[in-house]
Amino acid sequence: MIKIHKKRPYFTRFLFAFILLFILAFPCCSCASTDTIDEQDGKSFIWKISDDDSFVYLLGSIHIASSDIYPLASSIENAFQESDKLVVEINIKEVGPITTMLLFEKYGTYPAGGGLKQNLDEDLYKRLEASLEEMGVSISAYDGYRPWVVVTLTQETVMVEKEYSAEHGIDIYFLEKAVERDMEILELETVEYQLKLMSDFPDELMILMIEKSLEPPGLDDYIDIIGYMFKQWKKGSVEGIEEVVFKDLEEEPSLAPYYEVFLYQRNYEMMDKIEEYLTDEYTYFIVVGAGHLVGEEGLLNLLEEAGYEVEQLGD
């Protein structure tokens, strides 16, 4: 059980749920801790999905980590070696800086003449400015961006300070191995699709998230939860990851629309593509955020209900 935090006010719970869904469902904004991790019962967070004449491997990923997570379990490495094609949410190795900049300008900036200074009250703006200065960041670098961008960039800055990096993430790891093998790489989504989802959140709600992130304990509680979450991932614990992902939803059912957008809607779209992969002769190694696998409308349950054999792998 998670014992890191007591029941939090609504917008604090929303902030935590928002960040955890990013970590477990979006390649662009996520992290992991690696403190004293022991695998449980030899299980890994990977499954073999089979029908009568074909199968794919489905790996639940945490997208940003430290180098301490390696080496991965042999059950994961062996499954990759047996596969013909790699499938990821987005191929972030192929997303150039110009493309990223243009998409952030399209979905993450205020119209000409707008900015944080015009949209945050004076006190909040000053507190955010002071917090960013402590991180070595000038608020002028963020001023044209909408609040959801500020939340995600601030989160990533905190993670970099704690030596977490996308370069050590599981997605990047297998993307690089696929390139070495000259292996075909397929995408389930696009960067634009993911950024548009994030941009649909109301600015007013994200401003409240900025405010809550600046109040004690700030992101410290969240960092502890990430450590717990990563231990559950290394154990191959579906129940542990499910507890982390859905705890705030259980405490505040009004968060359901955000889970619908971030998880459930995308799960059904991913499910359709996985079923397509099961119709041909190739073996696919599919890497998606671990949050997509768990829960009643998670991929593992959806695949099992559709009649596929769902087998967790381990060493």
Image (cartoon, helix red, strand yellow):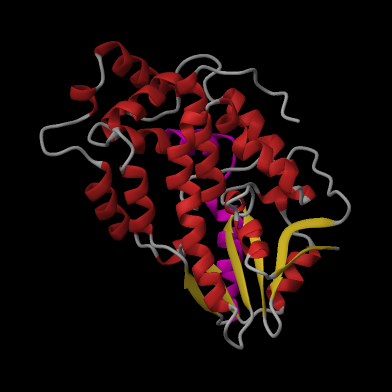
Query: What is the x, y in percent for residue 146?
Result: 27, 35
Main SS of the magenta part reads helix
- Residue located farthest toward the right when viewing the structure as drawn: 41
Query: What is the x, y in percent for residue 107?
Result: 26, 47
27 left or right, relative to 102: right
As drawn, 119 above or below 26: above
107 left or right, relative to 43: left
For the C terminus, which image quadrant? bottom right
Camera-side residue of 312 and 83? 312
Residue 136 is at least partly visible in this image: yes
Camera-side residue of 72 and 305? 305
- Residue found 48% across the figure and 37% down from its top: 256
- Residue found 30% across the figure and 26% down from its top: 204
Residue 26 is at least partly visible in this image: no
Query: What is the x, y in percent for residue 151?
Result: 40, 33
As drawn, 40 above or below 314: above
**27 drawn magenta:** no
218 left or right, relative to 190: right
190 left or right, relative to 61: left
Q: Which residues are magenta?
A: 154-181
In this rendering, the count of numbered labels is 0
Res 248 → quadrant: top right
Camera-side residue of 83 and 277? 277
- Residue located farthest toward the bottom when viewing the structure as drawn: 281
- Residue located farthest toward the left when viewing the structure as drawn: 113
Query: What is the x, y in percent for residue 166?
Result: 53, 51
Camera-side residue of 150 and 248? 248
**157 drawn magenta:** yes
- Residue found 71% across the figure and 82% down from its top: 52
